[in-house]
Image: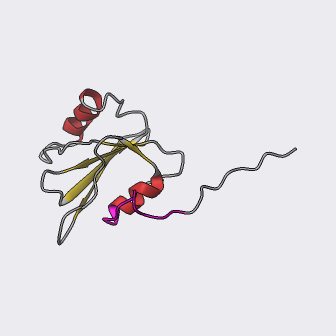
Amino acid sequence: MLQITASTRIFICLSAVDFRKGIDGLSAVCRNQLLKDPLSGAVFVFRNKKRTSIRLLLYDGQGFWLCSKRLSQGRFGWWPKDDPEIDARSLQTLLWNGNPRAAQFGNDWKKIKEH
């Protein structure tokens, strides 16, 4: 079971990736393009050129997870152009083919400091 929480770091590869790449190839994209360590526990998000599929790569301390979603119809309409980091709510919205920038989320819960 994957657990993505509010504290999970999530990085999106801004450009399309060849989905013939497996775990090793996507790990190389993390290192060389995103300049991030694929063993860090962060979630890395990739899309194909046609915008019909998304892949998630993450390391859980024992091994890699490679998850895919391919749309049965249409294309993913939103993809960031400049900021490669998103939060867990935005990832959830993206996976449901929504636009996280247009979604109206409630305020983040903040821990109240005790006096």
Depicted 66 relative to depicted 63: above or below: below
- Does the segment drawn in magenta span residue 44? no
Which percent across, then down, holds residue 62?
41, 39
Which percent across, then down, holds residue 5?
52, 52
Depicted 11 relative to depicted 108: above or below: above
Q: Is residue 1 visible?
A: no
Which percent across, then down, holds residue 94?
34, 59
Which percent across, then down, holds residue 90?
42, 56
Q: Is residue 52 visible?
A: yes
Q: Which residues are magenta?
A: 95-105
- Does the segment drawn in magenta span residue 98? yes
| Residue sitting at x 23%, y 34% | 29
| Residue sitting at x 36%, y 41% | 83
The residue at the far right in this view is 115
The residue at the far bottom in this view is 73
Residue 43 relative to residue 47: left or right: right
- Quadrant where the C terminus is found in the figure: top right
Depicted 67 relative to depicted 98: above or below: above
